[in-house]
Amino acid sequence: MSNLAGKVVWITGASSGIGEALVYLLAQEQCKLIISARRKSELERVKNICPDALQGNISILPVDLEQTDTLTLTAEAAANYYGHVDILVNNAGISQRSPAEKTVMDVYHRLMNINYFGTITLTKGLLPSMLSKKGGHIVVISSLLGKFGIGQATGYAASKHALHGFFDSLRAELWEENIHVTMVCPGFVKTNVSYHSLTADGSEQNLMDAQHENAMSAEACAKKIVKAIKRKKEEVYIGKQNYAIWIRRFSPALFSYIQKRVSIKQK
């Protein structure tokens, strides 16, 4: 298991939820952090929660994944903060709660722009730096819905599936360059993701799903992610819902029966 002390780690979506929890854990690991999200004020709040002795190792870099035309320059800027980035944690994203029939196409475009195109554009912008130093680690916070779909989440599941296609292929390209790729697939985690999920017309849901209310904490999820990073795992499933992966593999008919009867439920 590798030691993360002194590693330069760039975390997107660091202003809340899993990303925020990762900031606190990796700061304690003595990492040098670059933390990104859209709202600079929230990033400052997260930084200020960290112990004073660790704040000098935390740099703030606002990022909006929808602004794909700026992301290559943003990645180059991140690489210059400490001279390089050892670990990129692609955590930022947005979810969806709406039936396909009623969902406007703008919602699907936004989901793909943020979750997929924004993520791969940022990653590609950082690749030249990683290739020049012959090493790096790319961590992608996907979802169990990157492995299968459920009702009310067609666009979200599609965007996460796309990430697996890209990053699994990227791993095959870069392994000889000492660049690792870890796909993280959490189940339900108690964060604000459902509040900001897009509904059929593109507006935010503004309430928490029933499944998220009693789900694993962001802190517990982040601890498992850090362990996966240290072990350079290629893919990791987090949460009690990961049983679905094994049902699908060993009993496809049973999985199909369950899948047709499950959707994300509001409180």
Image (cartoon, helix red, strand yellow):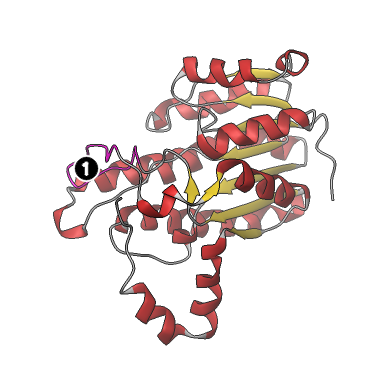
Name the residue nearer the viewer: 50 or 128: 50
Q: Secondary structure at mark 1?
A: helix
Local packing at callout 1 (Cα closer than 10 Å; few below 14, some 14-19, many 20+) is few
With respect to residue 120, does 257 lie above or below?
below
Residues in magenta, as a range: 195-206
- Secondary structure mostly seen in the magenta stretch: loop
Label 1 belongs to which residue? 106
Report which quarter residue 195 is drawn in.
top left
Residue 21: x and y in percent read 61, 35
Left-right relation of 67 to 201: right
| Residue visible at 31% across and 54% down in the picture | 155
Residue 102 visible (yes or no):
yes
Judge whether residue 7 is colored magenta. no
Q: Using residue 185 as the reference point, say whether residue 52 is left or right of it.
A: right
Q: Residue at x 73, y 13 (%)?
A: 52
Instruction: Identify the residue at horizontal 35%, vertical 49% (top origin).
Output: 209
Please name the amino acid that badge 1 sits on: Asp
Q: Position of residue 144 (x, y in %)?
A: 49, 60
Residue 61 in view (yes/no): no
